[in-house]
Image: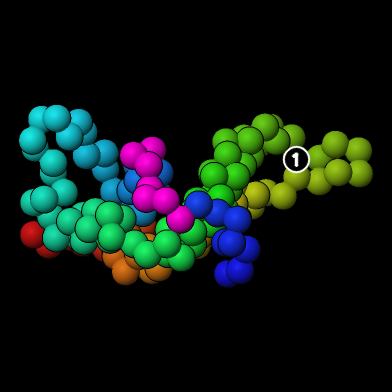
Amino acid sequence: MSGTASLSSAPLTEGEKMDVRRFCGYPAVGSRETGQESWRFFQVEGALEWRMGNLSGAELQQIRLYLLQLYPLEKALLGASDNLDTAQAASWYHNGHELRDRMTLFTLWRRRLCAFLGVTGGLELQDGRAVVI
């Protein structure tokens, strides 16, 4: 994707890292003050954390571009419920698959973020595949 030139190449903020984790389907890591950072104990989460801390300037810009795509897609999911009670109003017809279609698009962009970072998506993005530990 182009259009990253105006985006910051500064290290990710804690809020941006949290959003990357969330969009990639990983749970919250909690307070770093506890010394029990759960990602240390799981290979994929550790890889994600390492990558977020060691991205090049251009990669940081690309991550921010992904985040800019994902925020409105997530917000649109919340707004999709506004029309669930109306199938038709005058000449307007509700797309009965709107929520599914929006979720599919949102999931596509989440998976693209995971692929760019080189990590497998968390449980939410694994389509019910069994996780063997």
Residue stretch rendered in magenta on the structure: 9-15
State the residue position of label 1. 87
Residue at 62% across, 63% down: 3
- In the figure, 57 relative to 99: above or below? below
Where, quadrant-wise, is the N terminus in this rendering? bottom right
- In the figure, 32 relative to 126: above or below? above
> Would you say residue 128 is visible in this rendering?
no
Displayed quadrant of residue 84 = top right
- Does 12 lie within the magenta span? yes
Where, quadrant-wise, is the C terminus in this rendering? bottom left
Q: Looking at the picture, which amino acid does disc 1 mark? A: Ala
Local secondary structure at mark 1: loop
Q: Magenta-highlighted stretch: main secondary structure?
A: loop
Q: Is residue 54 left or right of residue 9?
A: left
Q: Is residue 17 left or right of residue 67?
A: left
Displayed quadrant of residue 59 = bottom left
Q: Position of residue 23 (x, y in %)?
A: 40, 50
